[in-house]
Each structure stands twice: as structure tokens, then as C-alpha cells.
């Protein structure tokens, strides 16, 4: 499944009808601040190379084998309905920044190696190609989810297969919202409570993994 991690305030906005936008569209509409110059300029280069011509309309997600998400990006993991993304999503072997650097795509005539992207329907084939080298006969089935998605101590240490989704996301695309990290303050808790109530009434499954 595809997962995206968000903050309580972002989920609250989605529950009230606001679209979830990628970095470029959110920046254009004044919904977020520009990242630090060194990161912003690198992101422009990476996105233009990975998604030439439509980089502004791509939203990044993670391919999850069991519903876990990249909690370094937000306390709440959103699981997306497959029927809502299957016709507008593709997968890449890893984070686009890592992919860009792996194939040295900053060079003028650089081209990526073939075979490391797939349409949504072929995501299993891409996973097999990407992870086959890491498998051993002694490895148990229980170890496989950790190979597919591993949350590191920092975002740069996360390991996952990246999902690229075209166009903004609305709350209707959500299958489940899970609170996976404790919330630091009362405002965040209030936003979570409001969002979960709105979404639960609309049929979105809600889970709190921080509750005792």
C-alpha cells in the first residue's frame, strides 16, 4: 500500500476539505515556506530530472508492506486506498534524491539505468528486482517488511521504495489514519482529535498506537 506521513495540523486541514499538495504547488500557493536554499535548489534539480515536465504535480509516498510509514515526516501515517491511486501512481526503487545520486543524474547527458521504475500494477516486480540481492536462504518471511521499509534515525537513513502520485490528494483517498508517535503539545492533540472525529464520521478508519 502507499503511505504518507503528516502532522496533526495537515490532517486537520484535509479533514476540512483542503487538498494535500506536493512541495512545489504548496510553495506556489503560499501554503508553506521555501526550504533552505541549498535544499530547495537541489530539490528543483532532482524533481526536474526524475519527473521532467510534470514535477510540480507529483506527491511522494512510501510503499509499505504492512501499513507502517516514515514517521520522521509526521506523527500520523495515512494509508491510501489502492483504487484511488492505482491509475495515477508509479514506483521508484528508492528515494528520488538517492536515485539521482546513484546514477549521477546531475551530469548534462546523464540517463538513469533502465528497470528501476514501474507502474503501480507492477510494484511487486520492482520490489523483487530491487531487493533480490539482499535476500538469503536463512531469511525468514518476518524479515521482509523491514527490507521494504526501514525508518532510520534521520530521514536520510530511511530506506523504502518511493511511490509517485500525480495530482493533489483529498481526504476521500484515505483508507486509514494512524497516530504513530506521541503528540508534543495540547494544540497538536486538539487538531488530531478534531480530524479523527471528522474522518471517522466519513468512514475513514482511525487508530491510535500511542494509547496505553
Image (cartoon, helix red, strand yellow):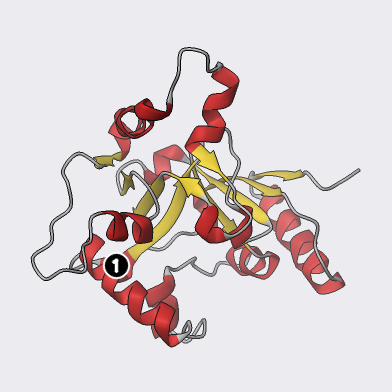
- The residue located at (52%, 26%) in the rendering is 144
Q: Quadrant of residue 142?
A: top right
Q: Residue furthest left?
A: 109
Q: Position of residue 37 (x, y in %)?
A: 42, 87
Q: Position of residue 34 (x, y in %)?
A: 46, 85
169 horizontally vs 52: left or right? right
In the figure, 5 relative to 42: above or below?
A: above
Q: Residue furthest right?
A: 212
Q: Residue furthest top?
A: 137
Can the viewer see residue 77 in this picture?
Answer: yes
Judging from the image, what secondary structure is the residue with disc 1 in?
helix
Q: Position of residue 40 (x, y in %)?
A: 40, 80
Badge 1 crowding class, 10 Å Cα cut-off, few under 14, some 14 to 19, many 20 or more, is some
Can the viewer see residue 51 in this picture?
Answer: no
Q: Nearer the viewer, residue 64 or 116?
A: 116
189 horizontally vs 161: left or right? right
Q: Which residue is mark 1?
A: 47
What number of labels is visible? 1
Q: Position of residue 83 (x, y in %)?
A: 41, 38
- The residue located at (58%, 64%) in the rendering is 14
211 horizontally vs 105: left or right? right
Q: Nearer the viewer, residue 204 or 146?
A: 146
114 horizontally vs 129: left or right? left
In the figure, 123 relative to 28: above or below?
A: above
Q: Nearer the viewer, residue 36 or 68?
A: 36
* Quadrant into which the C terminus falls: top right
- The residue located at (30%, 44%) in the rendering is 87
- The residue located at (38%, 48%) in the rendering is 94
Amino acid at each position: 500500500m502507499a503511505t504518507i506521513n503528516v502532522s496533526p495540523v495537515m490532517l486537520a486541514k484535509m479533514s476540512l476539505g483542503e487538498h494535500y499538495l506536493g512541495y512545489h504547488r504548496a510553495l506556489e500557493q503560499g501554503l508553506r515556506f521555501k526550504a533552505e536554499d541549498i535544499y530547495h535548489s537541489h530539490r528543483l534539480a532532482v524533481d526536474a530530472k526524475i519527473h521532467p515536465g510534470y514535477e510540480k504535480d507529483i506527491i511522494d509516498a512510501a510503499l509499505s508492506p504492512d501499513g507502517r510509514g516514515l514517521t520522521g515526516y509526521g506523527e500520523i501515517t495515512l494509508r491510501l486506498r489502492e483504487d484511488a491511486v492505482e491509475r495515477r501512481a508509479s514506483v521508484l526503487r528508492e528515494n528520488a534524491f538517492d536515485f539521482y545520486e546513484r546514477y549521477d543524474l546531475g551530469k548534462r547527458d546523464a540517463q538513469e539505468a533502465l528497470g528501476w521504475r514501474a507502474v503501480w500494477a507492477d510494484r511487486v516486480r520492482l520490489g523483487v528486482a530491487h531487493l533480490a540481492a539482499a535476500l538469503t536462504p536463512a531469511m525468514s518471511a518476518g524479515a521482509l517488511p523491514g527490507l521494504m521499509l526501514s525508518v532510520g534515525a534521520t530521514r536520510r537513513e530511511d530506506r523504502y521504495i518511493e511511490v509517485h502520485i500525480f495530482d493533489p490528494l483529498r481526504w476521500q483517498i484515505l483508507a486509514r489514519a494512524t497516530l504513530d508517535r506521541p503528540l508534543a503539545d495540547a494544540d497538536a492533540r486538539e487538531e488530531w482529535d478534531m480530524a479523527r472525529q471528522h474522518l471517522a464520521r466519513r468512514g475513514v478508519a482511525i487508530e491510535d498506537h500511542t494509547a496505553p
